Every structure is written in structure tokens, then in C-alpha cells.
Image: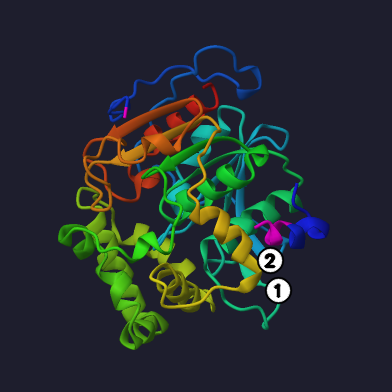
Amino acid sequence: MIDRRTFGKALGLATGAAVASLAGLQALPAASAATRRGAAPTLPAVTPGTHTSFASLKQVKAGLLDVGYAEVGPARGPVVICLHGWPYDIHSFVDVAPLLAAQGYRVIVPYLRGHGTTRFLSSKTFRNAQQSAIALDIVALMDALKIDKAVLAGFDWGSRTADIIAALWPHRCKALVSVSGYLITNLEANLTPLPPKAEYAWWYQYYFATERGRLAMENKDKRHDLTRLVWDTVSPTWNFDDATFERTAAAFENPDYAAIVIHNYRWRLSLADGERRYDGLEKRLAARPAIKVPTITLDAERDPFTAPPGDGSSYRNMFTGAYEHRTLEGIGHNLPQEAPTAFAQAVVDVDHL
């Protein structure tokens, strides 16, 4: 466990894929997570957008942050931590969380640093969004909530964060659901150009490398329109309404949002430095550590960032434990919110691998 006393020490340490479409899950009676044995229960299907909010939000001081998070389900249930990406927030899991809570899980959905009600404890802390710093935020959150081990499930930034914890601290990760598979960043490898079509999908990453991009993210109106454009383009089949986007866009009003987003993408392109105290962790991550915990990877067929050929084969060898892969047809980048039943089913299923 990484608590305050061991936080500094941690910083110094330096395809046979089964492709499945889960679009049409049938509704069957729920089974308690507390009595899980044998085959996983089939979850009842929920229409995306059935839920629009969490009943309440909580705050807890953890590591460098005062973390805002939603919590759903029994306090003593097995824990699932759901991690969002960019440009999204906890509402990506607003339909997922009740499905898991009904199975007896305690579901924790935190705002990542720079999002929503999560705040830095000190104005002097560098607004750093390199991958190891964000991963340590979640470990610190687990410590603060006295959670020894959890199923970790995420997409986009959330997949990367969950992958890192599963790779470096497998004793904290019971099992993993990772959309887009293995997303741990190797800065040197990331300097190699991608095929033009893939580079085109990353247009905003290069925009953020410019001063114009930074100013756009700091401008409320331009930030709003830019993130909405990303939603429209990376989820071409998702028929969301304006209210759905606006509920998430409220999380972008965090005072550190622009700084965190800009640093994340510039750091990944080696255009911005991280902090030396994370060098040991980044060195370990650059070695591409295998993930040994039970894992289900998900690819969204209409997500422009899904690695070809879209069957998980491009990253299959990075997962050496119990493993399954699923491709969701007709689904875009915001997979948990577009296909909540399929995402929640993967969480329950991976807990039975």
C-alpha cells in the first residue's frame, strides 16, 4: 500500500483475441457480488442516458489533491474504481455505476486532477499531468478511502491510469477493464510518426502544442466548442443531446483544467517536462511492463483511435494473465456512456476470470 510515509519511496523506484459484440444483452435477474462463484451473472440491459446524475458527490484529501468523487453501492461491497478520460468526466459512468451497485459492488468514480470538484491542496504544486502522477493520484485515493484492492476500469486517460496501476502495483488491482487495451506511454516510442489517418484523428493534440491551442483551452467559449467538436467526431453514432454534453462540460470549469490538459498532451509529445521525482516510475513504464492481473480489453469499432486491425491483436502480448478481448460494433470513443451495459458486464465478467 502506498500511504503518505511510503509515497516518496514509490516515486524513487525507479492475438488469440475473442471478439464479441455485446450490443444486445438480455435482461436476467441480478446476483450479489458477495456470493460470486462460477459464471458471472448477465446484467439487465440499460438504455444509455437512463440516468443523468449521481445522487451526491464526496470529497477526500488524498496525496496532492482534494478529490471529488461519486460513490454508489454498499459501503462494504467489493470495490470498482471507474476512471474517465478527456474530454469527459464522471458522467461517462452515470449508467454503469447503478448496474454495478445492483450487483453489490461499491463503485467509486473520481474526477481526475484538473476536472470537476477535484482541487490541488497547494497553489505551489506544479500542474503536472504526466501519466505516473495521475496514476499515483488514484493510489493515494485508494489509501485515503482505505481500499486495499479494487477492480479498475477506464477509458482514454482512465485506461492509461488503470493500466499503470495494474502494471506497477498489481497487489492494488484485483482485475482490469481497459478500453483500447495497453495505453502506457513510452515517450521515445511516441516520437515515431503514426500513419496519416491516425495522425489526423489526433488533430487537437497538435493544436495544444501551440500557443493558440493553449489560449483556446483557457477561453471558456472556445474550450466549450472545441470539446463539443471532439465529442461529435470521435463518437459518430452516439445520439446524445445538448444537456448530456453540458452536464460534463461543467467539469471543465475547474481552474486547473486548461493547465492539466495542455500539459498532458505536450508531455506525451516530449514538448513539456515532467517532474524529476517521477523519473523512476517513468523509467519503469518506458520498459513496457506486462500486465499480469485478470483483464478484459474493449475496442470500440467506431472509435477513430482504435488500433488496427481492431481485434486487440496489436497489444495482446502485453497481457499475460487471464484475458479476454471484446469489440463493440457501432460504438465510439466514450464507450462506457455509449454502451453502459457492455462496459458494466465486462467489469462483472473480469471479476470472475
Q: Secondary structure at mark 1?
A: loop
20 left or right, relative to 249 = left
Magenta-highlighted residues: 10-15
**Tell me, what colour scheme is on the image?**
rainbow
Residue 232 in sight from this viewpoint: yes
- Which residue has dot 2 on it? 66
Depicted 236 relative to depicted 203: above or below:
above
Q: Residues within 10 Å of mark 2 (few under 14, many from 20)?
A: some
Label 2–label 1 contact, CB within 8 A: yes
Name the residue at the left extreme. 197
Q: Position of residue 295 (x, y in %)?
A: 48, 32
Viewer-proximal residue, 253 or 112?
Answer: 112
Q: Secondary structure at mark 2?
A: strand
Q: Residue at x 50, y 73 (%)?
A: 260
Q: Amino acid at mark 2?
A: Asp
Separation of marks 2 and 1 at Cα, in angstroms? 6 Å
